[in-house]
Amino acid sequence: MAKLLPKSKHQALCPHCDLVVDMPSLNANQKAQCPRCETTLSTLWSEPFKRASTYSLAALFMLVLSNLFSFVTLNVAGLSSDISLVSILDIMVEQRYDLLAFLFMVFVQILPAFCMFALFCISSRANLPKAVKIFLVRWLIRLKHWCMVEIFLVGVLVSFVKLISYGQVGVGPSFIAFCAYCVLHVRAFQYADKKWLWDLVESQPKIRLLEPGKTGISQGVKSCGCCGAILENASIECPRCYAHSFVRKPQSIQITMALLIGSIVLYLPANLLPIMNTSAFGNSIDSTIMAGVILLINEGALPIALIIFIASVLVPSLKMIAIAWLCWCTKTKKVLNGHRMMQVYEVVEFVGRWSMVDVFVIAVLVGLVSFGNLMAVFPARGVIFFAFVVIVTMIASQFFDPRLMWDRLEKNKRAKVN
Ligand SMILES: [Zn+2]
Ligand SMILES: [Zn+2]
């Protein structure tokens, strides 16, 4: 995909570094990037309406199919266990882990279904009132990161490795439908470009011509946090999406740090308490995250042990260190390399949600390994703490305003000159 030089008079304000950019007119399959922080400002796909609506509708259809039939089967010593996606929920509720059932339902079913529905409505250019369109696009963009369909699929595949040691594993028709749903869902999201979606609702409000290559804050303008429109600093409500916007996210560092401390507090019980209890032939064994990794190594499943170790131990710890480092650099005068900080910020944004893999592994094991006194897997308290570590760190990184790093960089440059 080609990087384009700005040529036309359409302007954008980079949401990550606050730089005013002259937007080029894009051809199909091209994207425009911010020259300072390399954030993608817009992507234009060929036939975006047709593709987005087709993929999102097909994804919804596959989601329905993946809930109707058998998902996975397990045979242990002549006994057979057969689960559908809905029965995973039933079993978790039965065992009074309603919160875990709720998280599974929200992240794997409700939010992805809503996003696909919203994308279909907007991209098929359905004749909807403007208020409905605003509602759909606003929440589609906000909830995109909270859809964990592909993470659940990885969780299912990891749980297969554990299940093979118990007995014979088979996949049902719903599993095939779910794999197709996962691919279609990821493809549909590729077309959910923020600028394109908001332009479909209404074109950007008109504003005076700004000087490109300079920051918005120095020219008295701000970027709408919801739709990305350029607004005068004095305006309170965005005329396009009606959201309240700020020059910089208020109390960004303080809120991010408070949430980070909260996640560190939750991280201790998440690691010290057992996350899962396995009972087999009258013996009951509690296992913590690390004990699960060691067990996988002993069983010879080294690649899976590595996935769980990276997702459940390495990623959350490094993410917390990275968020603390970003806040510290932004607050003090230590910003030396804006690009490196931006890369760290983007990695934190991207990888954080993948830590949910272990939570989904437990959900599948609990649903499938349920043979009464012979063999059963139960969730334990640690898994709830762990799920909240992931959620709280995700919220923390969303409260962090990366424009503050670039502000600090500018200040440092000015201080050097003086
Ligand atoms: Zn930028
Ligand atoms: Zn707006």
Image: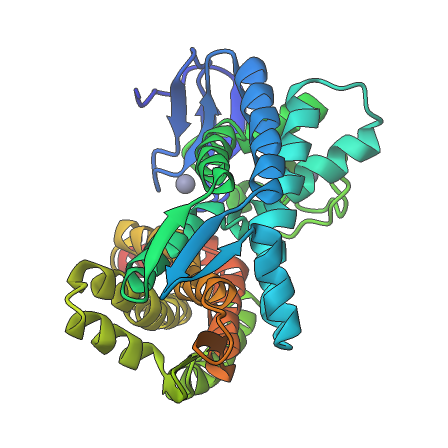
Left or right relative to 412: residue 401: right
Along the viewing direction, whichever of 311 and 175 lies nearer the viewer: 175
Left or right relative to 408: residue 62: right
The x, y position of residue 66, in whole percent, is 56, 40
Along the viewing direction, whichever of 269 and 79 lies nearer the viewer: 79
Q: Is residue 305 above or below residue 25?
A: below
Q: Residue at x 51, y 29 (%)?
A: 188
Q: Could one spot residue 228 in this view of the protein?
A: no
Q: Quarter of the picture for ligand 1?
A: top left
Where residue 135 sits, quadrant-wise, is: top right
The x, y position of residue 7, in whole percent, is 41, 15
* Quadrant location, the C terminus: bottom left
Q: Could one spot residue 151 in this view of the protein?
A: yes
Q: Residue at x 32, y 67 (%)?
A: 166
Q: Is residue 347 above or below residue 32?
A: below
The x, y position of residue 87, in whole percent, is 60, 57
* Quadrant location, the N terminus: top left
Q: Residue at x 57, y 19 (%)?
A: 54
Left or right relative to 409: residue 73: right
The x, y position of residue 395, in whole percent, is 54, 63
